[in-house]
Amino acid sequence: MATQNQSFQAITESCDECGRETPHDVSVQIRTESQKRENAEFSREPYRVTECQICGEESIQRMNNA
């Protein structure tokens, strides 16, 4: 059975849409950048994805700019 940790603090970040600091869901996702099928397995990169829990605004930032 899953339980909630009441002491957990949400991650707060600035939201351009709300104009203030708001709680956000933050995740790292592996996304495929190439549209070509034969290159897809070589074009995956990590992205930081944040979603405002107030307005739903999503922000995506590529993490590996090598």
Image (cartoon, grey):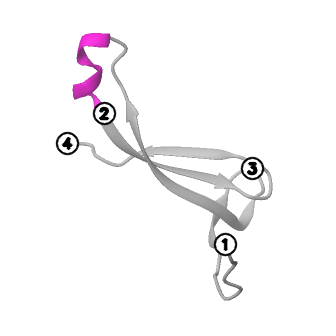
User: Is 51 on the left-hand or right-hand side of 54?
Assistant: left
Image location of residue 35, percent across then percent down: 37, 14
- Locate residue 59, reporting x and y percent: 58, 46
**Crowd around label 2: few <14 · some 14–19 · many ≥20 (10 Å):** some
- Determine whether label 3 and label 1 are within 8 Å by CB: no
Which range is magenta?
37-44
State the residue position of label 1: 2
Q: CA distance from mark 4 to mark 3?
A: 30 Å
Secondary structure under tag 1 reads loop
Dominant secondary structure of the residues highlighted in magenta in the image: helix
The x and y percentages for residue 51 are 65, 52
Mark 4 or mark 1, which has the lower sequence index?
Answer: 1
Whether tag 2 and tag 4 are in contact, CB under 8 A, the answer is no
In whole angstroms, how far apart are the C-alphas of marks 3 and 1?
Answer: 33 Å
| Viewer-side residue, 4 vs 54 | 4
Q: Residue at x 69, y 52 (%)?
A: 16
Residue occupying the point 64% across, 81% down: 9
Pointer 2 residue:
44
Earlier sequence position, callout 2 versus callout 1 = 1
The answer to whether the residues at label 4 and label 1 have Cβ atoms under 8 Å apart is: no
Give me the residue at 65% from left, 62% from top: 24
Q: Residue at x 29, y 21 (%)?
A: 40
Mark 1, other Cα within 10 Å: few <14 / some 14–19 / many ≥20: few
- Could you say whether the residue bearing mark 2 is in a helix, strand or loop? strand
Residue 66 numbered mark, or none: 4
Q: Which residue is mark 3?
A: 17
Q: Is residue 12 left or right of residue 27?
A: right
